Image (tube, coloured by chain):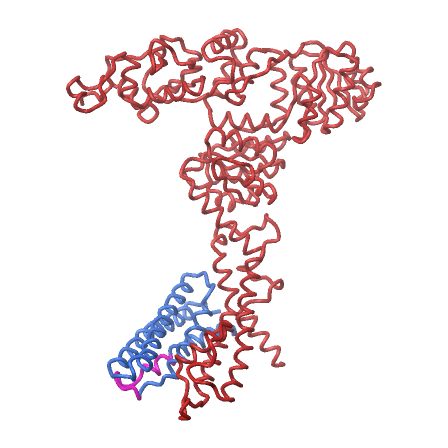
Chain colours: A blue, B red
Amino acid sequence: MNLEKVVFGFFIVLAATLNFGFFLGGFDNVDHHNIYELYAAVVVNLIATVLKFGDRTQIGAVHLATSLVADLQLIAATVVWAYASGVAGGMSPHLISSVVSLSGGALFANVVSVALLVAETASLSRH
Amino acid sequence: MATGGILAAVRRRLFGPPAGRAPQPAREAPADAASLPDEEAASSAMFLMLRRMRAPLIGLITIYAVSVLGLTLIRGVDPQGAPWQMSFFHAFYFMSYTATTIGFGELPHAFNDAQRLWVTLCIYLTVIGWAYAVGTLLGLLQDRGFRQALAVQRFARHVRRIAEPYYVIAGYGQTGRLLGHALDARGRRFVVLDTSELRVDETQLANYRADVPALAADAGNPAHLRLAGLMTQRCAGVFALTDDDHANLAVATATRLLRPDLPVLARCQSRPVSEQLEAIGTHSIVNPFDRFGDYLALAMRAPATFRLMEWMSGLPNSELPPRREPPRGRWIVCGYGRFGREVVRDLEREGIDVTIIDPVEHNAADSRFVSGTGSEADSLERAGIADAAGLVAGTGDDTNNLSIVAAARRRNPGLYVIARQNRQSNAPLYRAIAPEFTAVAAEVVASECLARLTTPLFVRFLDVARSRGDAFVAPLIANLEQHVGRRVPVLWAVHLNRHGAPTIARWLARPDRNLALGDLLRDPAAREQMLPAVALMVVRGDTVTAVPPADFALAPGDHLLMAGRSHARRRLHATLNRELTCNYVLTGRNLPSGWMWQRLAGAPVTGSPPA
């Protein structure tokens, strides 16, 4: 067992699950989406991104790309959330659905990331 | 297992071993130039940086995450006393300006004690996080391996950017420098590979006109040759000029195997290696000592031919000082090393009596040998200095050679003296003592390399001149001096085809036209006058015509070797490339240059023939 692989896999899967957890619920219902969960998803995604730094293989490059996409989407979601609660004076169904759809996009990138992880593991030669 | 041990293990797995310990390929710092990262690793500078920044970046993210989360969780009050909790946005804003030590104060409302307690902790945490990240980054920039990777990248980029043909010089010693300056003066590009970083830095200080990419690397390594652009079509040739024969052999072998079509020129000072070089098919092997012996023999046998060769391979426009011809009497050679052996062999082949002074005891029965160093009175006397015609001071030590020359001249003032110069730094001393001839290995190799790779026709011409001897060369020299002058002429090759001479190619495309060499060499400024240039040789297929007469009929596809003043070269270039100039030179008619007037006056005579 390779501890590096454990940590790597842990963060990638955790990023996807947190993202999924936030995405789950009514599309325009603020009560179904927890800001702390979004926050945790952003932080874990950032860590997962940094863990993918410096891998020179082709699959490593795609890994990094998916992570960067997820970061971008999630940060956009948090910006919209901050705008809604601070500038727009409260969360409207329109704004919360933007946040959720952005996190949905990030979820897709995270799913690709997990798929890559699975593909990479499956392609490892079995001794 | 202790907790500390587990933590250390996690750290090692995640971020690689701490600097300076067990190897990890991507970050291994090369100990010397020989183990420089190869082509693939050349792109690794960025990866190396990212890999090393993993730990500090994850540390920073974690510290920020914990601090922000804590701030949002702690309950505070607003100025009206109502309970108030920080939003993530405000918490992140606060942490951003606090962690970067900007410190706008407690926004948006004054904090309570619980919040202040947490913020105190956060300040120390973030300062440590930033210090760690910045420290790692700066350390990385200082890192030898990282800088090497950057240097390799820069070198590869510069080489890729050279758009014209260029040469690879492996070994930037005395010879490499001389060759580099000569190539640069002729407007040729080159790149340098040398194991010594000092010499590589020297290329940047050498005041070359063009940019000279240089890399501290072992040129014998094929990966480094590839970095220098060996595989590109623009690479025009490789010079292996290091002072190590085996390194040169390695360069030549690698080049022959990777690019069999590329000319390779190797310097070599020992016969066994020279045979190996021949075996792998190196195009030219330059052994400076052997070559020098040949020159000396040639200077005795055919002084005019030698003079011509010396004159032609000099720096353009410089004046060649008159030189005494080496006499054919008895010669004394001091020092019987690699240089001495070659000289003695060539002198004896010319039928010259040679006495050898060498400190090593040789065959006592062989009367040619006198033991001694040559600088003491005794050995020179025993070698019969008084009635000798010439002397070669050919030891490997400059101080010895100089004192031999001084001692010998005192005993025989009329002596013809040849001195071998080993170090460039001693050149002023040799100039002061003024031997009739100074043998500098680096110069011999550099001029030979230059002639062979840049004007291959010239080398062929020299072979012709050598085989025909002085009877052929003496009138040629007179002819050159009359037409071109006494200064060293510029040599260039002209190919009479569509690319090298489009106007002439079109002119000759009509079967009813012919072209005499003398007509081509008329001056475009006034065609009654001839350009100060002489055609040394015309090569047509396998036939070589040396010094063709003025009425020699040129044919398409001819290669011409020209010698002349540099303005003659420019004017001939105009004749060969400009329709109107060519018309004037060949027919004496001045055609109008505008399209309209050309239509009215009839198409240019050299215009493309009707299909």
- B462 or B316, nearer to the observer: B316
Residue B149 lies, with reference to residue B257, above or below; the image says below
Q: Is residue A19 found inside the magenta-colored segment of the image?
A: yes
In the rendering, at what x and y percent does residue B324 appear?
64, 11
Question: Which segment did they paint magenta?
Answer: A17-31
Residue shown at the point (18%, 23%) measured from the top left: B611
Residue shown at the point (46%, 63%) measured from the top left: A55
Q: Which of the 4 quarters of the picture holds residue B144?
A: bottom right
Q: Is residue B132 found inside the magenta-colored segment of the image?
A: no
In the rendering, at what x and y percent does residue B108 appear?
41, 82
Q: Which of the 4 quarters of the picture holds residue A92?
A: bottom left
Residue shown at the point (48%, 48%) measured from the top left: B154
Q: Residue furthest front?
A: B80
- B192 or B508, nearer to the observer: B192
**Residue B252 visible (yes or no):** no
- B119 or B271, nearer to the observer: B119
